[in-house]
Image (tube, rainbow, N blue to C red):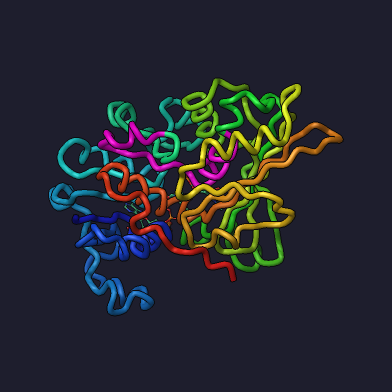
Amino acid sequence: MKVGIIGASGYGGLELIRLLHSHPEIKKIELFTSSEEGTVFSHKYSHLMNIIDQPLQKIEHETLANYDVIFSSAPAGVASQLLAPLLGIGPMLIDLSGDFRLKDLSSYEQWYKKTPAPAHAVEQSVYGLTEWNREAIQQAALIANPGCYPTAVLLALLPLVKENLIDVSHLVIDAKSGVSGAGNGLNRMTHYSETNENTAIYKINEHQHIPEIEQAFSMFAQDTPPITFNTHLVPMTRGIIATSYAPVKEGVTEAQLVQCLEEKYAEEPFVRVLHEASKFGTNQVYGSNYCDLHVKVDPRTNRATIVSVIDNLVKGAAGQAIQNMNVQFGFEETFGLTHVPAFI
Ligand SMILES: NC(=O)C1=CN([C@@H]2O[C@H](COP(=O)(O)OP(=O)(O)OC[C@H]3O[C@@H](n4cnc5c(N)ncnc54)[C@H](OP(=O)(O)O)[C@@H]3O)[C@@H](O)[C@H]2O)C=CC1
Ligand SMILES: CC(=O)N[C@@H](CCC(=O)OP(=O)(O)O)C(=O)O
């Protein structure tokens, strides 16, 4: 199979290259750019010397139409313009940005503060939360790959919300991300001297992933009241930890919550439910496509603490995108994704 990557030189693009390189069904990977046409990729990124030595190509629709799959790892607002004209003319499209995720265009405009994608394209897009939407992904022409935070949050909470085991009206989600979540652009927020030795909350109550999480609750579980979701930037490169707190419904025990997660994910290759995890963190999924979950109920407050960890660039972006490609083409779902986490 022949795949093209738009935005290859960004963090999501680099991760797509790393993972696709060991995918047994991918025979050709070609890279597209909006700014560096002709640059030999391994001259820009020397860790890819003798691995990816071809030049970056100009983004042209006639060329892109000839690929089996196009991954777009371009920014929100740009991806929709690049991909909408390719819809239905050949390649399967997988977009890592938020452009096709929100079905309500006015909600996209409100949270992203950008012009929404064309309505017909958003209508056709399929939300690529693999473990929850396989059937639709198999039929999709355009996959809206989930955001990094929503992936971590939804894999942990959807089973419990669906089975009505926790009280969502008092749900609080506290999430923390490594700096690569912000991409490779330079700005004050990710400046070393303001990130190192610092942990900062950002986009307080205004994060663009709030409507995405609420939409997924209603798609896969049930309509819920608005949620409280906040995000923090921590001085590490990769990883997301999302800790959610919610009262358990009357009579519900910790054992029931654990069983609910275990039953949902028993056959899943990339979701692990941890037991007796008195301490765990993002390093146990680093560089891998795993999402690890843990739940505990505090008997004093009757509140559940539900924790999930992912690598934002793998399960939160490129890894899940490849998992979705595997589902769509009927490949083993683990192809290209069998990397063991780099714990240290
Ligand atoms: N980083 C993460 O953890 C996650 C990111 N995402 C989403 O994935 C996408 C990529 O993120 P990330 O790799 O971190 O971002 P980066 O900023 O690292 O890279 C984005 C790339 O997009 C390309 N690009 C920029 N402007 C344009 C344009 N006008 N037209 C076409 N291409 C353009 C650039 O490459 P060039 O100049 O060569 O064209 C750039 O390298 C974003 O939409 C992001 O929101 C989703 C989940 C997690
Ligand atoms: C650390 C950091 O800045 N993370 C980014 C996540 C980016 C992302 O996944 O964006 P989309 O889902 O909108 O594509 C953020 O919080 O906006």
Q: Left or right: where does residue 183 sit relative to residue 99?
A: right
Instruction: Work out whether residue 330 or residue 104 is closer to the camera in this orientation and state it.
Output: 330
Q: Left or right: where does residue 322 sit relative to residue 239?
A: left
Q: Quadrant of residue 339?
A: bottom left
Is residue 11 among the parts visible in the rendering?
A: yes
Q: Left or right: where does residue 80 sit relative to residue 245?
A: left
- Residue 257 at x, y percent in the picture: 66, 34
- Residue 148 at x, y percent in the picture: 50, 47
- Who's the residue at 54% across and 21% down the image? 222
Which quarter of the rendered picture does the C terminus lie within? bottom right
156 inside magenta stretch: yes
Instruction: Work out whether residue 121 or residue 131 is closer to the camera in this orientation and state it.
Output: 131
- Residue 96 at x, y percent in the picture: 39, 47
265 inside magenta stretch: no
Q: Left or right: where does residue 79 sit relative to residue 263?
A: left
Q: Quadrant of residue 280?
A: bottom right
Is residue 98 among the parts visible in the rendering?
A: no
| Residue 43 vertical position relative to residue 182 in the rendered view, above or below | below
- For the image, the number of numbered tags is 0
| Residue 14 vertical position relative to residue 252 in the rendered view, above or below | below
Q: Quadrant of residue 307?
A: top right
- Who's the residue at 55% across and 33% down the image? 158
- Residue 151 at x, y percent in the picture: 51, 43
- Who's the residue at 43% across and 37% down the image? 114
Which quarter of the rendered picture does the N terminus lie within? bottom left
Q: Main secondary structure of the magenta part?
A: helix
- Who's the residue at 26% across and 61% down the image? 24
**Magenta residues, as a range?**
133-157
